Amino acid sequence: KPVIELLAAIPSVAYGFFAMVVLAPLLQENGGRVLAIAAWMVGLPLAVLAVVVLSDVAGSLFFKRLQVFGRAVAAVVLGAGAVGGLVCLGRMLSGLQIGTGVNALNASVILGIMALPTIVSVSEDALQAVGRELREGSYALGATRAETLVKVVIPAAASGICAAVILGVMRAVGETMVVLMAAGGAAHIPSPWYDYLASVRTLTATIVAEMGEADQSVGSSHYHALFAMALALLAISFVLNMLSEWTVHRAQRKLRGE
């Protein structure tokens, strides 16, 4: 956990510098291959985890009437299907042509890395806050460690995990320097709007980039528009905060049986 908290303390400018100097040229020169490798790095552990869960954790439910050989065959089939899907996805991604490395994808990757330490740290606190009596009661009723984790610990800590995710999203939404340095700063909507390989500019980056250009002395419409954007960001943060609080209190009431 100290390492996670240390990562959370790294200034956002450092992340932005990494995105602009290292990741952007890498995406521009080898974008398709980088995305293919990333798909393998993300997808392969998930595929292995799915095989383990279906063949072990869910064995008493899904494979209850199958013998050991049947479980092994099912696990092999699932693993082969997952690897085959990753191969097809990797081939499709390898053919992508990326015009510029400073784009929405670059900023999204860095924002995800920045938000991850907050999510992991708060989620760990939520899981550790679950009382031992719940775990011991589950063990006493004959549940395995996996069943206790899935059916007792995670539901009990669900409110804290949801709050952690919302906090991570809030950090990504309110980030300024990273998106200003890594997203390209294009002052127009991409065509099509969902093109994640195009340069974009977020609300926070627009405020920082254009506030100095706005006519502040006479209070121009440009100046007022920037303040309206800041107000919209404040409203988004407020709504996410309220959603986080509501999720936590609702889960706590549910645990108390209210």
Image (cartoon, helix red, strand yellow):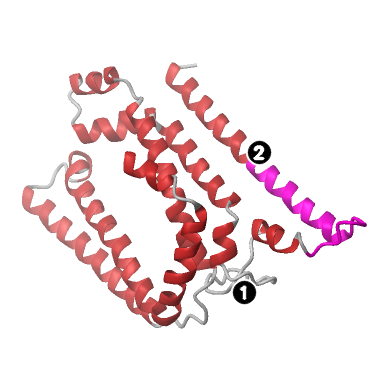
Instruction: Tell me the amino acid under the disc marked 1.
Output: Pro
Q: Examine the structure image and report whether residue 226 is included in the region drawn in magenta.
A: yes
Give the number of the mark in front: 2 or 1: 2
Task: Tell me the element at label 1.
Answer: loop
Q: Residue, x 42% and y 33% (percent of image)?
A: 158
Residue 75, image x, y percentages: 17, 56
The quarter of the rendered structure image containing the N terminus is top left
Image: 138 above or below 45: above
Q: CA distance from mark 2 to mark 1?
A: 30 Å
Span shown in magenta: 213-237
Q: Nearer the viewer, residue 204 or 93?
A: 204
Q: Which residue is mark 2?
A: 238
Tell which of 258 and 118 is nearer to you: 118
Exactly how many numbered labels are in the figure?
2
Q: What residue did someone put label 1 on?
A: 192
Q: Residues within 10 Å of mark 2 (few under 14, many from 20)?
A: few
Task: Please tell me whether residue 230 belongs to the stretch shown in magenta.
Answer: yes
Q: Residue at position x 24%, y 67% from top?
A: 83
Which amino acid type corresponds to the residue marked 2 in the rendered image? Phe
Whichever of callouts 2 and 1 sits on the residue coming sooner in the sequence is 1
